[in-house]
C-alpha cells in the first residue's frame, strides 16, 4: 500500500515538472514577429559620448591633416537660448561649410561601439587591428581640461567599419563608417561646395572663354534707370549688340546653381594633371558689388564630371556638367537674332532703299497709341487695311521689316560700307538709326549701323524671299501690302487662299 502511494506521488511530481517545462517553452519563446516576447539584446557602451555643451576643443588627426575645431558661444537674443558655433582654427581664409563642421563635431563626441572585440585586449594583440600604431585619432577636450583620445585602426576584412579604442583602455570595438571617416578627414571635407556663391538676381556680368573655337564672349547687364528691375544683357565682345534674351540668362542661371561634387586637391602643384593649365572653358561672373568669381573647366574626371577650379577656393574639384546645356552654343545663338528691333510705337518713319527701289512707312499714334486710333501709311497711302479675319495687314508688313535676322557673325572682317541696302529709322523721340547692308556674296550681307560695321551678317532671303507666305522678305512683303491697299474695299482686303504645294 505504501509503495502504491509513493508511485502516485512520484507520478504527480513528474506531471507538474512536465507542465512547467511546457509552459516555460511557450512563455519563454523568442519573438517571431507574431506578438511573442523578444529576447532583449544588451546595448554596448559607446567608445565615447559627451555633451556638446561640455566640450571645449576637438582635434581630428591623421596622416594627411591635423584639424582643430573650437566652439564659440553666441548669446541668445530676447530671451532665446545661447547657441554654439564651431570654427576651424586656421589662418587660411577659405569658405568653410558650417554644416560639414557641425557634422564633424557630432561624430567626434559620439563614437559608437557596434561590436565589441574584447574588453581586455593585450597590447601585443593590437597590431592585428591596426591599433598598435594608429593612423588616425580623435581628441576631445572637456570643460575640466580632460582630453579623451579615440584611436582608429584598420578596417575589418571586407567591411567599411573601423577598429577603434579609447586610449588608456584595453577595450577594442568596431565602429561605423561615419566615425572612422570623420577621423580621417582633411580640409577638403570642410570646403563649401558652392562654386560662385552668387544668386541670379545679383549677377550683372558674364564672360565665356571657350578654347575649341577661341571664343572670347563678354557681356554685361545694363539698366535703363533705377526703376528698371530686370535690365538688358548687352554683348561687349566680340561684337557689340544686345544679347540673346534666352541663351545668356539660361547659361548664367545654370552657372549660378553649380556645385562641386568632390574636392580632389588643395593648392595643386600641377594643373596639367587635371587639364587646367589650358582650360577648355573659363566662365566669369560679376555681381552688383563688383565681386568677380572665375570658374575653369579642365579634362574629364569620369562619370559625367570634369575637373574644375574656382577663384573662390584654391582646390581642384570634380563637377557635373549635365546642367550646362548652353556652354557649346555657337556665338550667333548668344546674341539677339534681330539685326534691329524697335517697337512699332517708338517709330515715326522708316525709309527703305535697295538699288532703284524704295518705299516709306509712316506711323502716327498721337490720338491714342493703339491700332484703332493710329495712322499707318505706306508711300503716302492709307495702310490701315484688314483681312477678313480682322488682322491688321500693316502689322504683318512691319513684322517683315524688323525681321532681318543675324545669320552669322564675322567679328574680324573689315568690309566696306557700300550701302547696297539702306534702312533709316526715325524715332518719335527725333533720334535716327541708319542700317546699311553691303553685299558679301550672292546670299549674304554685312551689317552696318550708323556707319560702323557691327560684325553681323544677314541673309538675302530676309529682303527678297517669297518662298514662305507667312514670312516674306521685305520687298515681297511691300508688294503684298500695296496690293492690299489698292484692292481694299471699305478698308478690307480678302486675301487669296494660297495654292496647296
Image: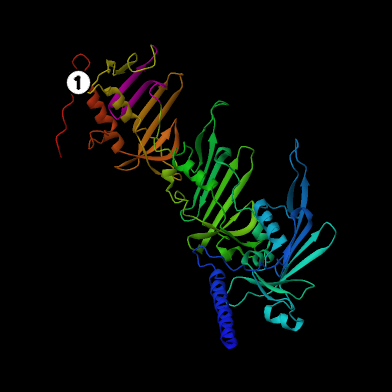
Q: Vertically, is 229 above or below 457?
A: above
List x then y, in percent, for residue 350. 36, 23
- Residue under circle 1? 493
Q: Nearer the viewer, residue 454 or 354?
A: 454
Q: Is residue 349 left or right of residue 286?
A: left
Image-quadrant location for residue 202: top right
Residue sitting farthest toward the top: 367
List x then y, in percent, for residue 346. 42, 22
Residue at coordinates 56% horizontally, 41% vertically from top-left?
205
List x then y, in percent, for residue 293. 61, 47
In the rendered image, residue 407 lying in the magenta stretch gets the answer: no
Element assignment for label 1: loop
- Quadrant of the drawing holding the C terminus: top left
Residue 497 in view (yes/no): yes
Residue sitting farthest toward the right: 144
Residue sitting farthest toward the front: 1
- Quadrant of the drawing holding the N terminus: bottom right
Q: Nearer the viewer, residue 105 or 274?
A: 105
Residue 90 in view (yes/no): no
Q: How is the image coloured?
A: rainbow
Q: Is residue 346 left or right of residue 160?
A: left
Image-quadrant location for residue 472: top left
Q: Residues within 10 Å of mark 1 (few under 14, many from 20)?
A: many
List x then y, in percent, for residue 10. 58, 83
Image-quadrant location for residue 338: top left
In the rendered image, residue 351 lying in the magenta stretch gets the answer: yes
| Magenta stretch prevailing secondary structure | strand
Q: How many marks?
A: 1
Q: Vertically, is 297 above or below 379?
A: below
Which span is picked out in magenta? 343-366
Amino acid at each position: 500500500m505504501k509503495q502504491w502511494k509513493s508511485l502516485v506521488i512520484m507520478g504527480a511530481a513528474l506531471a507538474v515538472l512536465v507542465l512547467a517545462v511546457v509552459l516555460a517553452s511557450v512563455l519563454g519563446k523568442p519573438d517571431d514577429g507574431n506578438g511573442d516576447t523578444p529576447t532583449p539584446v544588451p546595448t554596448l557602451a559607446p567608445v565615447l559620448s559627451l555633451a556638446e555643451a561640455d566640450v571645449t576643443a576637438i582635434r581630428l588627426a591623421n596622416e594627411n591633416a591635423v584639424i582643430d575645431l573650437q566652439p564659440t558661444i553666441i548669446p541668445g537674443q530676447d530671451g532665446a537660448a545661447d547657441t554654439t558655433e564651431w570654427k576651424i582654427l586656421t589662418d587660411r581664409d577659405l569658405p568653410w561649410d558650417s554644416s560639414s563642421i557641425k557634422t564633424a563635431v557630432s561624430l567626434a563626441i559620439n563614437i559608437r561601439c557596434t561590436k565589441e572585440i574584447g574588453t581586455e585586449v593585450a597590447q601585443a594583440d593590437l597590431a592585428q587591428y591596426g591599433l598598435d600604431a594608429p593612423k588616425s585619432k580623435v581628441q576631445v577636450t572637456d570643460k575640466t581640461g580632460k582630453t579623451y583620445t579615440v584611436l582608429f585602426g584598420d578596417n575589418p576584412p571586407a567591411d567599411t567599419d573601423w577598429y577603434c579604442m579609447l586610449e588608456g583602455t584595453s577595450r577594442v570595438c568596431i565602429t561605423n563608417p561615419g566615425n572612422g571617416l570623420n577621423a580621417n578627414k582633411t580640409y577638403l571635407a570642410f570646403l563649401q561646395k558652392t562654386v560662385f556663391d552668387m544668386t541670379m538676381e545679383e549677377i550683372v556680368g558674364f564672360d565665356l572663354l571657350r578654347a575649341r573655337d577661341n571664343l572670347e564672349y563678354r557681356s554685361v547687364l545694363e539698366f535703363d534707370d533705377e526703376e528698371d528691375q530686370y535690365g538688358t544683357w548687352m554683348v561687349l565682345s566680340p561684337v557689340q549688340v544686345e544679347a540673346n534674351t534666352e541663351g545668356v540668362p539660361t547659361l548664367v542661371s545654370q552657372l549660378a546653381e553649380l556645385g562641386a561634387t568632390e574636392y580632389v586637391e588643395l593648392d595643386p602643384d600641377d594643373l596639367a594633371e587635371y587639364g587646367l593649365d589650358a582650360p577648355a572653358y573659363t566662365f566669369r561672373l560679376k555681381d552688383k558689388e563688383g565681386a568677380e568669381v572665375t570658374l575653369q573647366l579642365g579634362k574629364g574626371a569620369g562619370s559625367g564630371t570634369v575637373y574644375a577650379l574656382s577663384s573662390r577656393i584654391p582646390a581642384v574639384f570634380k563637377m557635373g556638367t549635365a546642367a550646362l546645356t548652353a556652354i557649346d552654343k555657337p556665338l550667333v545663338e548668344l546674341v539677339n537674332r534681330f539685326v534691329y528691333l524697335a517697337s512699332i510705337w517708338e517709330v515715326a518713319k522708316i525709309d527703305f532703299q535697295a538699288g532703284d527701289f524704295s518705299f516709306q512707312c509712316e506711323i502716327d499714334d498721337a490720338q491714342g497709341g493703339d491700332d484703332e486710333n493710329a495712322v499707318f501709311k505706306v508711300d503716302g497711302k492709307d495702310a490701315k487695311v484688314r483681312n477678313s479675319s480682322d488682322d491688321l495687314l500693316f502689322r504683318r508688313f512691319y513684322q517683315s521689316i524688323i525681321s532681318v535676322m543675324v545669320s552669322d557673325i564675322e567679328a574680324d572682317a573689315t568690309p566696306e560700307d557700300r550701302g547696297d541696302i539702306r534702312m533709316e529709322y526715325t524715332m518719335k523721340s527725333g533720334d535716327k538709326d541708319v542700317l546699311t547692308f553691303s553685299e558679301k556674296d550672292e546670299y549674304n550681307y554685312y551689317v552696318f549701323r550708323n556707319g560702323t560695321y557691327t560684325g553681323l551678317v544677314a541673309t538675302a532671303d530676309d529682303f527678297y524671299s517669297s518662298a514662305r507666305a507667312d514670312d516674306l522678305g521685305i520687298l515681297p512683303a511691300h508688294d503684298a501690302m500695296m496690293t492690299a491697299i489698292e484692292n481694299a474695299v471699305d478698308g478690307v482686303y480678302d486675301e487669296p487662299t494660297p495654292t496647296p504645294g
